[in-house]
Image: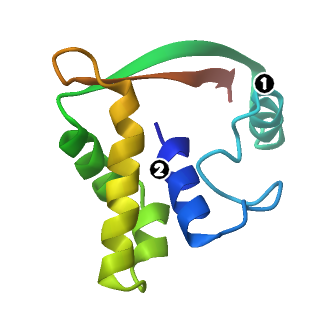
Amino acid sequence: MLSLPMGVMRQMMDMPAPPPGAPGPFSLADAGTLEEALNQAGFTDVRSERLSVSMDFPSVEAYLNMIQDTASPIPAALADKPADLREKVWQAIAGAVGQYATADGTIRMENEAICIAGRR
């Protein structure tokens, strides 16, 4: 759900991927790294579980609105770019998201989430 627009933007703007360990929405995507972070923060009995999560949006436009409202690295990276480039990037993201459309136009994206718990 988030990697798709970031990948499109990086490709179109010839941006390198962030270096390993850099802060970002995927910096704790490895369950072991996430568990270690909680252990270092003083939590005990830390456990995690990976879950499949389906995210549904009524349309491509609804998905784009969510990304524009909540995924701040994307709008921030585009903020100082020319308007025509911004528009091309958003159109390319819309096109890429279209592959997840169901017969009724709903956008359904399968994702993975890590649920983690610990005691403090």
- Residue at x 39% of width, y 79% of height: 79
Describe residue 23's horizontal placement relative to residue 20 as left or right: left
Vertical placement of 40 versus 109: above or below? Answer: below
Q: Position of residue 93 (x, y in %)?
A: 39, 50
Report crowding for label 1: few under 14, some 14 to 19, many 20 or more residues within 10 A (C-alpha). some
Describe residue 69's horizontal placement relative to residue 115 as left or right: left
| Quadrant of res 87 | bottom left
Q: Position of residue 19 (x, y in %)?
A: 81, 61
Residue type beneath disc 1: Thr
Residue bearing the label numbered 2: 5
Residue type beneath disc 2: Pro
Describe residue 85's horizontal placement relative to residue 113 as left or right: left
| Quadrant of res 12 | bottom right
Q: Position of residue 15 (x, y in %)?
A: 65, 69
> Of label 2 and label 1, which has the lower sequence position?
2
Residue 44: image tag: 1
